[in-house]
Image: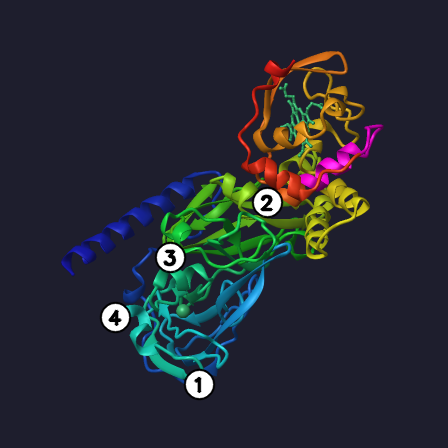
Amino acid sequence: MKLSFTLTALAVVLALGTSACSRSGAVSADAAATPVVAGSQHGDFGPPQGEPIHAVLTSPPNVPPPIHRDKPAKVIVELEVVEKEMPISEGVTYTFWTFGGTVPGSFIRVRQGDTVELHLKNNPDSKMPHNIDLHGVTGPGGGAASTFTAPGHASQFTFKALNQGLYVYHCATAPVGMHVANGMYGLILVEPPEGMPKVDHEYYVMQGDFYTTGKYREKGHQPFDMEKAIAEQPTYVLFNGHEGALTGDKALAAKTNETVRLFVGNGGPNLVSSFHVIGEIFDTVRPEGGTVEQHNVQTTLVPAGGAAMVEFHTEVPGSYVLVDHSIFRAFNKGALAILKVDGAENKAIYSGKEVDSVYLGDRSEPNLQAVSTAAKAHAAGTLTKDEQIAAGKQLFTGTCSVCHQANGEGLPGVFPPLAKSDYLAADPKRAVQILLHGLNGKVTVNAKDYNSVMPPMSQLNDDEMANILTYVLNSWGNPGGQITKEEVAAARTAPAPAPAAAEH
Ligand SMILES: [Cu+2]
């Protein structure tokens, strides 16, 4: 008690010091010099007033409206657990366990001092019992013990929201890791009594890591893989529960000269997120969803079972890419979302040119089609040669065209041509090995030497490789032919070939 009192006094002194500094500085926009006091000491904790209120719950990426209430109330929250099959990537489904039918679960917004009556229903079609642990609750288990609910049952408990902040909630039924890995988490915002500063847009973005028995983007229904989960080696790392949840026509939207606040959560179960928006700087961050404000931040760490509030102002139009800056997760496991900002260019701040498809790869708008075409092709079963060529053409863009160019001509001295390549024509099946294992050392293509490195394209699965190569073989004056996914599968299990140089 004494210690916390001393710390509070110190915080006041520091805050006064800061405001004195900013007054002497050129910019005095930093009005947030109000002393920051721990949530439970500062609030409106009288008995609930007025009629009970039913909380507005929203599905991601939407956030319930600000509260604008000056008295504590009794707030009723009704949440239903639903187990359901949903897409996790194009052509890939997964059985998610959800709070409210979405991953992450419904967003809950209350005011500090509110008395929250939480009802948890477990859908009769569920196979598992579930419960809820809200990190915004003061009391053993955060509600978990009071809410253990069998399929077709309901339970309830009541808590007072003592601390303001942004909190994760999650299922805590054994095996806890599995329930969380299946998508059982969401956010609850406890607004300060005076509300939060007004912004133009508020969005709900939550990261999670997922473990499937198949590889990344391996098509069909994918079961949960406990071994991978224990090894902490996710197949997918995603914002809002499925790859592409926030890209293309589902991208977050804003206009230039607006303020955006993101409520960012991380459900885990395992990974910590290095949350970053490519091309933006966070003007304000409330790290870990707490009360202290940090400014001018590039990347903020969001712990598993934690959250952050980030705010920024939009100056320049274009696509801003939300990523986990542990960057393989963004480009090879799906942790990528887009904020599309519309408005007039501002050349004084930025000279122009969109984030291009090179940065976004197959998640950029022109290339999104590629992934869904491939998924549809797969769903149709065995493909004709023409269908393979069509699917392969889509995939070539965003995968191979970065280096070999869309017209297959390559770049002189750097990337060899695939168009009329005598190297390719000499042994088309060798190309399967090149995709699987990459290529380095000296190669001669159309009488020109290249001595560079092509990385393995092992993120592609068998049918994707077969389709791309069939497309390449039937384009730009190449000799034609067909590669089947069975041939790729066989090559995958065969030992890697000798280096290319030895063959020449
Ligand atoms: Cu559960």
- Report the amino acid beneath label 3: Gly
Q: Is residue 166 visible?
A: no
Please identify the residue farthest to the left as the structure is shown.
2
Q: The magenta stretch spans which residues?
A: 465-480
Q: Which is more N-terminal, label 2 or label 1?
A: 1
Q: CA distance from mark 2 to mark 4?
A: 39 Å
Q: Which is more N-terminal, label 3 or label 2?
A: 3
Answer left or right for 417 relative to 263.
right
Instruction: Please say if 276 is above or below 2.
Output: above
Q: CA distance from mark 1 to mark 2?
A: 41 Å
Q: Which is more N-terminal, label 3 or label 4?
A: 4
Task: Name which residue lies at 38% across and 51% down.
Answer: 303
**Which residue bears the numbered disc 3?**
305
**Which residue bears the numbered disc 2?**
321
Q: Which is more N-terminal, label 1 or label 4?
A: 1
Front in this rendered view, residue 261 or 215: 215
Where on the image, by quarter, is ligand 1?
Answer: bottom left
Percent of width and height locating residue 7: 22, 53
Percent of width and height locating residue 47: 33, 82
The colour style of the image is rainbow
Q: Which is more N-terminal, label 4 or label 2?
A: 4
**Which residue bears the numbered disc 4?**
140
Q: Is residue 478 magenta?
A: yes
**Which residue bears the numbered disc 1?**
52
